[in-house]
């Protein structure tokens, strides 16, 4: 081999070795030109990754609402309630409520109303007109709405719930049903009286020898008119709203009187007696209360203790309660007799 051929072979080997060195950068690096013209190994630029779609193995959410369930109210001739909850059809709920009433042996059983998934109840006024109240989730809200509708729509007032609310198709339906099953008439009257938005007025009138009164009327004017109607020549002594009034007079028949009011009948009585006895000595007193929170208009009707502040006092003026006239009363607290009848 001549010298010239050997030179070319060595040159080729050197050049090929240099090129192989440039391509032989460590993993993650590649040849790159430096500013001074030399070749260096630089990081290989990251290439975008192509994501392949993947199916996740999860249970789909069921957002469909449950089918509607129904509740129904039935009442007997005394407006005692019977109810059914969580029945698949309106007809089935009504039949179950009626059956409960008939099994109790009550007369006049009839369906009062039904509603779908949610809570509801009914209220009625002195004329027996029915008003409903419903809410999607809250039994207390349904009761408030029934009483609000009655207060707004009744011409006679005296609104009272038929029952606490019941619910259908809700997780709390069973618990609410169990609570309602234990309710008493006293419970219903207490709740109704707290929700009654009307004012109930009472008045005393007197001519000095005779005292007349009224209670349970919706305006002061109506209350005073009712009291004066029973006594020609009488004048209004005092009027009171959602509270108690007391009128006291001397026990020696002097035609004088003192009056006062208070939300508590005992306090109204005490105030009137203090005024009267401070001026005239021994006095007699009469008390009347007007409002849904009072069980009786005359809280001392069954006692003699309130009549005289001192023993053996002579009789005073004649008293007459004008609320015995039709249409002047609000419902008294009702009770359940041994046979279950409301009266």
Image: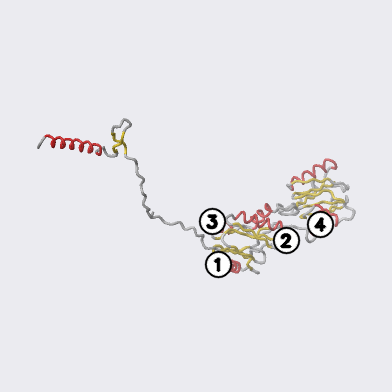
Query: Where is 92 relative to 195, above or below?
Result: below
The answer to the question of whether label 1 and label 2 lie on touching residues, with beta carbons closer than 8 A, is no
Q: Earlier in the sequence, mark 3 or mark 2?
A: 2
Pointer 1: what residue?
89
Q: Are marks 1 and 4 in contact (CB under 8 Å)?
A: no
Residue for badge 4: 322
C-alpha distance separating marks 1 and 2: 32 Å
SS class, disc 4: helix
Residue picked out by circle 2: 126
Camera-side mark, 3 or 2: 3
The N terminus sits in image quarter: top left
Q: Residue at x 49, y 58 (%)?
A: 63
Please give left or right for residue 31 compared with residue 233 in the image. Answer: left
Residue at 52% x, 63% y is 67
Quadrant position of residue 120: bottom right
Q: Is residue 156 left or right of residue 11?
A: right
Give the label on residue 172, or none.
3
Rendered residue at 88%/48% (across/down): 255
User: In the image, residue 85 lies at what x, y percent?
Assistant: 56, 62
Tell me where residue 72 appears, x and y as whole percent: 59, 64
Q: Quadrant of residue 43?
A: top left
241 lies left or right of 169: right
Q: Which secondary structure lies at badge 2?
A: loop
Which one is closest to the eye, mark 1 or mark 4?
Answer: 1
Residue 247, x across and y down, in percent: 81, 48
Which quarter of the figure is the C terminus placed in? bottom right
Looking at the image, is mark 1 or mark 4 earlier in the sequence?
1
């Amino acid at each position: 081999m001549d010298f010239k051929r050997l030179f070319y072979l060595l040159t080729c080997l050197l050049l090929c070795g240099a090129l192989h060195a440039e391509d032989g950068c460590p993993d993650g690096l590649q040849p790159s030109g430096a500013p001074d013209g030399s070749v260096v190994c630089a990081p290989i630029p990251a290439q975008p990754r192509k994501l392949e779609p993947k199916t996740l193995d999860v249970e789909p959410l069921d957002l469909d609402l449950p089918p509607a369930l129904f509740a129904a109210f039935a009442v007997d001739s005394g407006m005692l309630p019977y109810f059914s909850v969580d029945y698949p059809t309106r007809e089935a709920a009504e039949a179950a409520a009626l059956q409960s009433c008939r099994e109790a042996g009550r007369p006049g059983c009839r369906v009062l109303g039904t509603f779908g998934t949610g809570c509801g109840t009914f209220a009625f006024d002195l004329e027996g007109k029915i008003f409903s109240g419903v809410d999607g989730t809250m039994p207390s809200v349904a009761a408030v709405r029934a009483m609000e509708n009655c207060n707004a729509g009744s011409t006679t007032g005296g609104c009272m719930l038929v029952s606490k609310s019941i619910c259908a198709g809700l997780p709390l339906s069973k618990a609410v049903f169990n609570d309602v099953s234990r309710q008493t008439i006293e419970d219903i009257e207490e709740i109704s009286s707290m929700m009654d938005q009307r004012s109930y007025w009472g008045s005393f009138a007197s001519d000095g020898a005779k005292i007349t009164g009224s209670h349970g009327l919706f305006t002061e004017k109506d209350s005073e008119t009712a009291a004066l109607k029973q006594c020609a020549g009488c004048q209004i002594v005092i009027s009171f709203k959602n509270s108690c009034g007391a009128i006291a007079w001397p026990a020696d028949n002097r035609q004088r009187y003192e009056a006062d009011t208070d939300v508590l009948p005992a306090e109204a009585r005490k105030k009137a007696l203090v005024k009267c006895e401070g001026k005239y000595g021994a006095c007699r007193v009469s008390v009347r209360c007007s409002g849904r929170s009072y069980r009786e208009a005359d809280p001392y009707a069954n006692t003699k203790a309130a009549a005289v502040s001192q023993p053996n006092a002579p009789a005073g003026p004649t008293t007459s309660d004008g609320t015995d006239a039709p249409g002047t009363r609000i419902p008294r607290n009702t009770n359940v007799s041994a046979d279950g009848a409301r009266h």
